[in-house]
Amino acid sequence: MPEVTEGGNAAFHNYLNDFSHIEDPLERRRLALQKIDEAKFGWYHVKAILVAGVGFLTDAYDIFAINLGVSMMSYVFWGGHIPSSTETLLKVSTSVGTVIGQVGFGTMADIVGRKKIYGLELIIVIVTTILQCTTGHSPAIEFPAILTFYRIIMGIGIGGDYPLSSIITSEFATTKWRGAIMGAVFASQGWGQITGGIVAMILIAAYKSQLIDANTAAECGPACMKACDQMWRILIGFGAVPGMIALYFRLTIPESPRYALDAELNKITNAQTSGGSSSASEFNTTADEKDQGFNTTVKSLDNKERTEINQVNVNNGNEEAHNQGPPKASFKDFRHHFGQWKYGKILLATAGCWFMLDVAFYGISLNSAVILQTIGFASSDNVYHKLYNSAAGNLILICAGSLPGYWFSVFTIDTIGRKPIQVGGFAILTALFCIIGFAYHKVGSHGLLALYVLAQFFQNFGPNVTTFIIPGEIFPTRYRSTAHGISAASGKIGAIIAQTALGTLINHNCARDGKEENCWLPHVMEIFALFMLLGFLLSFLLPETKRMTLEEISEKYHGEVPLGGPSISTPTYNDTISSASINHMV
């Protein structure tokens, strides 16, 4: 009898143990996957969403927190004016670590399994978050250097959460609502941004008496500096709290049923191939006995019926070939599989679309100063008003555009489909960025506000959600995590380019030509429109995956028939033999 496996909690049920009494591994696999795929949406799935969504909540919270935290730090370490290079370094450092984590953890999850490393990435985030808010300046080492180091390591943990939470959610989700469940996990980013805004506003309000009298950065005295120093540490450090709550559930998850069952069946197949196990011998003996009995029956039939039976033998032979399953995961097989255009184009599309999107997703924030001024939350020389307006204004914009967009995707992705939402989102974003770029000085501040909110909405009710979901379900089990990590890393590379190379273009030759600051911003928006157009075109390489099991997706789009036979309808014994022949044999 198969051994009972470890793990399982209120958020991730251990389906393997439900059928541990079944001796036949193929039947055990079929029953376990059927139970997962056909389950009704319930509180079990909600708990899984909360546990898996913690990483994305922390990621978005940190992005919001560091943007405001840098302003707070500037009054403590740089007299209110942080060098632009240092500011960019602190903001980009997390993305650099994220790329490493996405590729590293993504690959490891396909090598050692999901269970062994799920939770490790959250431990990294928690520890480095605490270390960040306890560090300070010293004669031996520069403050920005040590903070950057911690943020890179934290980014590795955040990066690891992308492929792990995506594929684990995908492999435990019911087929009918898999897209909504994965979308809800990713939509935790919206709650992270809102949490960051609320925590920041509470802190700024709590320290108002120490900040309000500082009308300029020069007037921020010892009490003001101490308040800012305490605020940024609390703001950054609070990001570890959600992770601590969810850590237990991640460390006690069972192994993903699809990964565990495929690994078990691969071992059995290898044993049968080598002939080195008694179970393989018994299997072959039983098969031979059945074949002899079957052939004896065939001899008693007429020619027509023999022809039908021979067709069955052909089908059974094909099925035995299918039972060998997909090849074992290896770098060589990875290159061979994705080196074929019909499979490689899918990875190109998932990685390319994510790259194109993130260039503009992180670059749209370049308009924030103008937008905040339009809604009455302009920057101020007063320390209190500057910090409060930044926190409150960005919180309003998130609620107006980003958050609704996330949940429109969640509620429609399993009915409209992944591909239509992504293609439509890229098309609308291309048009919006063209309008912002070519008509920047004509639409006015209120028009720009409307376009900004629409861009935020259609990024999330569009490719920002779908580029996360599709890689988590479109690839075979043995490379699902690796391919998702590669796709996600491509997106972060796009974000780094947007924050560094393209971000500096907004002031291109402005001082030399005697123009106002950010004079090149309209042209940068035009560049973003080009990236959206490229994303639109790449999206046509993607197939649709809604309401299909993961095995059906692998079989249809990667030509991989799972162990135990095809999941998509194929001729079977009963389909091939006529009822008359069966009656005659009986």
Image: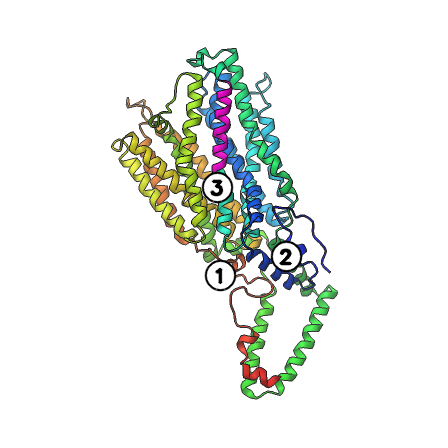
The type of residue carrying mark 3 is: Ala
The type of residue carrying mark 1 is: Lys
Q: Is residue 516 left or right of residue 229?
A: left
Query: Residue 299: percent from the left, percent from the top?
Result: 62, 86
Residue sitting at the far right: 278
Q: Residue at x 57, y 33 (%)?
A: 154
Q: Quadrant of the N terminus?
A: bottom right
| Numbered label attached to residue 187 | 3
In the image, is residue 194 part of the stretch drawn in magenta? yes
Q: Quadrant of the C terminus?
A: bottom right
Residue for badge 2: 261
Query: Residue 334: percent from the left, percent from the top?
Result: 55, 53
- Extent of the magenta region: 190-207
| Numbered label attached to residue 337 | none
In the image, is residue 316 part of the stretch drawn in magenta? no
The type of residue carrying mark 2 is: Leu
